[in-house]
Image (cartoon, rainbow, N blue to C red):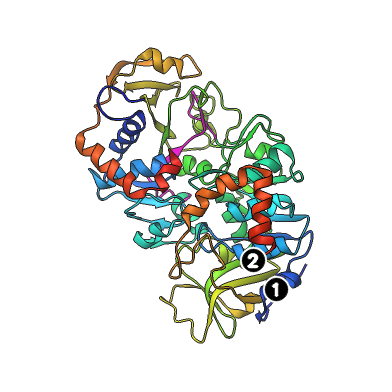
Amino acid sequence: MERAGDYTPSEMMIIAAARALRNDDVCFVGIGAPSAACNLARLTHAPGITLIYESGTIAARPTVLPLSIGDPELCATALTTVPVPEMFAYWLQGGRITLGFLAAAQLDRFGNINTTVIGPYARPKIRLPGAGGAPEIASFCRQVFVIVPHERRAFVERVEFVTTFGFGEGGEHRSRLGLTTAGPALVVTSHCLMRPDPETKELIVTSLHPGVSKEEVMERTGWPVRFAADLEETPRPTAYELSVLRELLKRSAPDAAARS
Amino acid sequence: MTDPGAPRRARFLSLPEAIAEYVHDGDAVAMEGFTHLIPFAAGHEVIRQGRRDLTLIRMTPDLIYDQLIGMGCARRLVFSWGGNPGVGSLHRLRDAVEDGWPQPLLLDEHSHAGMAAAYAAGAAGLPCAILRGYVGTDLARENPSIRFIECPFTGERLAAIPALRPDVTIIHAQRADRAGNVLIEGIVGVQKEAVLAAARAVVTVEEVVDDLAPASPNSVILPFWTVDAVVEVPGGARPSYAYGYYGRDNAFYLSWDAISRDRETFLRWMGEHVLSGRT
């Protein structure tokens, strides 16, 4: 589904996500689109960003995108590699990671994520892979970004299973549970950027990608989605961003093909 | 169950001997390796020897558990992420959970942080792991082994889960010396904890050498008195990888999706590549 210009919604999504990353971020990276966005940031405006994968690799600088969080490429290029219990206990739970970058199968209006089951838990219609590191990443990184293609089946009113707590039922729910971190501060989709309302914590569209209408986002969202009063338009990808991303994906083939 | 803390003496055995002696029907079996050093050859021998009613423990079940589940070896799965990394579903795992084929599979489901902490508690001889975890999730609703306690000092609410104490842990490593001391380098995952938490431990290695020649004094070493059996199996982690020996066969991980999707195709592949052969 090419739009005006010569980039895809998926490229727009990854580029918009990469732009949100900072050079001084210490980022816990999920595999797939989060990894593409984080490495694009590292190869463009944020060369000093620290990328951490849950296999224990700290400050990985892969030349190709890993197919798995434990690909040899990550260990070979990392500053250090630590055991998995240490990764979760000292580095994540210890509060030393500024940003968690997650993907999602299903996401709701309060940023809760389901990657466990569609249907009843004991006999599900679809059994998804499960939690992995996400529940604690979302709790103990200082803030969380989520990247997910904007499809109706993914953006639901309430997730069927809370694998990863976002804002729960909204409002002060996080702090009531003792969480002191910010939670899902940004959701990047193929069509827009969403951020939580400061009071209710409901996800609000704050920026539409070029050529995307409000109606299209409403059709693809399973709740009556709201738009910010100062709604912006996401700047379109630059030729430089596109060329670096495409080179990265090309280098990573055939692995990249598996994710598309 | 033998005492996980008791000194052992590593014996050098063949793979069929080691599996026959140390893996029994009904055991809780952990095969660890976080993407790296996954003990595929040992898992295939478990399948060939037809073990049944196993409780399979592993943070990331991966293809080897897809194969064990699809071949009917497993009754229960203790895990925290069950997919084909970067590719998609484990279809045999899904078939067992969604449709009970070849038999129903009970799940004891955690997060990575919980599983890692539970192995560490097992290695430390503690009854349970305590962590800040599972906050606000539905995992605790479905898994009665996830509970919450109050810190006696601060009053903070913390998650508690039982220590993992496998009957047997199986791992793959780069090298062992002739005394049976084992060296692991690269992504070291949770293997050390899984071995120290287990009543019995079997280690397959790429090669047995006179001198481990560790790359650094901080390499992970399992002294011979922490393992029961050492088995030389070059290539024993394929299609996973052994850092310094061979790379990850990402193409096979991609091709597994089509092989595993259909029951007949899966059974035919297993017959040709695992049941009939020495993998």
Q: Which mark is residue B75?
A: none
Say whether disc 1 or disc 2 marks the residue closer to the N-terminus: 1
Q: Nearer the viewer, residue A26 or A221?
A: A221
Which residue position is annotated with label 1?
B18
When the figure is inspected, residue B40 is found, relative to residue B173, above or below; the finding is above
Label 1 packing within 10 angstroms: few (<14), some (14-19), many (20+): many
**Chain name for mark 2:** B
Amino acid type at image mark 1? Ala
Tag 1 and tag 2 share a subunit: yes
C-alpha gap between disc 1 and disc 2: 9 Å
Element assignment for label 2? helix
Q: Residue furthest left?
A: A239
When the figure is inspected, residue B32 is found, relative to residue B179, above or below; the finding is above
Label 2 packing within 10 angstroms: few (<14), some (14-19), many (20+): many
Residue A60: horizontal and vertical position, in percent?
A: 35, 55
- Whether residue B155 is visible: no
Q: Left or right: where does residue B87 sit relative to residue B29?
A: left
Which residue position is annotated with label 2?
B42
Residue at image coords 68%, 65% = B45
Element assignment for label 1? helix
Residue B161: horizontal and vertical position, in percent?
A: 65, 50
Residue at image coords 47%, 62% = B187
Amino acid type at image mark 2? Ala
Q: Nearer the viewer, residue B224 or B209?
A: B209
Residue at image coords 45%, 15% = A219
Residue at image coords 59%, 60% = B32
Residue B61: horizontal and vertical position, in percent?
A: 60, 52
Q: Magenta stretch: give its range.
A: A93-114
Q: Mark 1–mark 2 contact, CB under 8 Å?
A: yes
